Image (tube, rainbow, N blue to C red):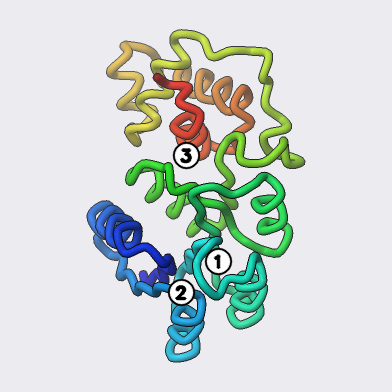
Amino acid sequence: MRILLADDHNMVRDALKSYIERLEPDARIVSAESFGAAYDEVQRDGEFALIILDLRMPGMDGLDGLRRMRERLPKVPIVIMSGGASHEDVRNAIDMGAQGFLPKTLTGPALVSAIRLIMAGEKFVPFGAVDAPAGDAGDADSHAPLTQREREVLQYLEKGWSNKEIARALELQEVTIKLHIRGICRKLGAKNRTQAALRAQEARLAH
């Protein structure tokens, strides 16, 4: 699995490369320090499973870099990454075909989980990154806080535990765990357990 990671900060590239390769051994990271260098890489060899573009790096010119990369590789998922993007930037990126948005504040495990979600064909926008996009965070039941039991289940979801493992740890039936997960997803406006765990990490709801 080849991933093109374009960011103008060496420390960011090295840290992300280390996180991804440690948690996803099959990944091969190709690094670039500017949009121009990233574009040269895809012209040489466009066989990438995923492209991650830093929003503020040289050559991006706002979201024009996303547009150009999208035109060059229309079938390859492209993700925008930033340490501080506005809601408008995130929404515009998604509207222009980005598969997701990765804040640089995500932990290593959360980053890899987001990448796995994107590689599975899902879009990933962390909780609160945009103002209630249709069919996503807008479906959250924000007036219903997580129960203590839901918080406990959510902590295990963040660790990647299966329903059976969670049930065993909490001494509950597996069907009960499924019901708790359904409630968690509804309250967080998440489509599945992975997205719920990622949103919880972003919003720190489990801590």
Q: Residue furthest bottom?
A: 44
Quadrant, the N terminus: bottom left
Q: Which residue is mark 3?
A: 194
Q: Secondary structure at mark 1?
A: loop
Q: As displayed, is residue 42 above or below residue 22?
A: below
Name the residue type under label 2. Ser
Q: Residue furthest front?
A: 58
Q: Which of disc 1 and disc 2 is earlier in sequence?
A: 2
Place of residue 118 in the rendered image (x, y in percent of width and height, measured from the top left)? 51, 55
Place of residue 46 in the rendered image (x, y in percent of width and height, measured from the top left)? 48, 84
- Name the mark nearer the viewer: 2 or 3: 2
Give the residue at x 46% y 78%.
38
- Distance Cα–Cα, label 1 vs label 3: 18 Å
Q: Secondary structure at mark 3?
A: helix
- Distance Cα–Cα, label 2 vs label 3: 31 Å
Q: Which residue is mark 1?
A: 77
> How many neighbours does mark 2 have within 10 angstroms: few (below 14), some (14-19), or many (20 or more)?
many
Q: Which of disc 3 and disc 2 is earlier in sequence?
A: 2
Give the residue at x 35% y 74%.
30
Place of residue 29 in the rendered image (x, y in percent of width and height, measured from the top left)? 32, 69
Q: Which of disc 3 and disc 1 is earlier in sequence?
A: 1
Q: Which mark is residue 34?
A: 2
Give the residue at x 48% y 83%.
42
Name the residue type under label 1. Pro
Q: Quadrant of residue 154?
A: top left
Q: Secondary structure at mark 2?
A: loop
Q: Which mark is residue 13?
A: none
- Distance Cα–Cα, label 2 vs label 1: 19 Å
Left or right, residue 4 beside residue 184: left
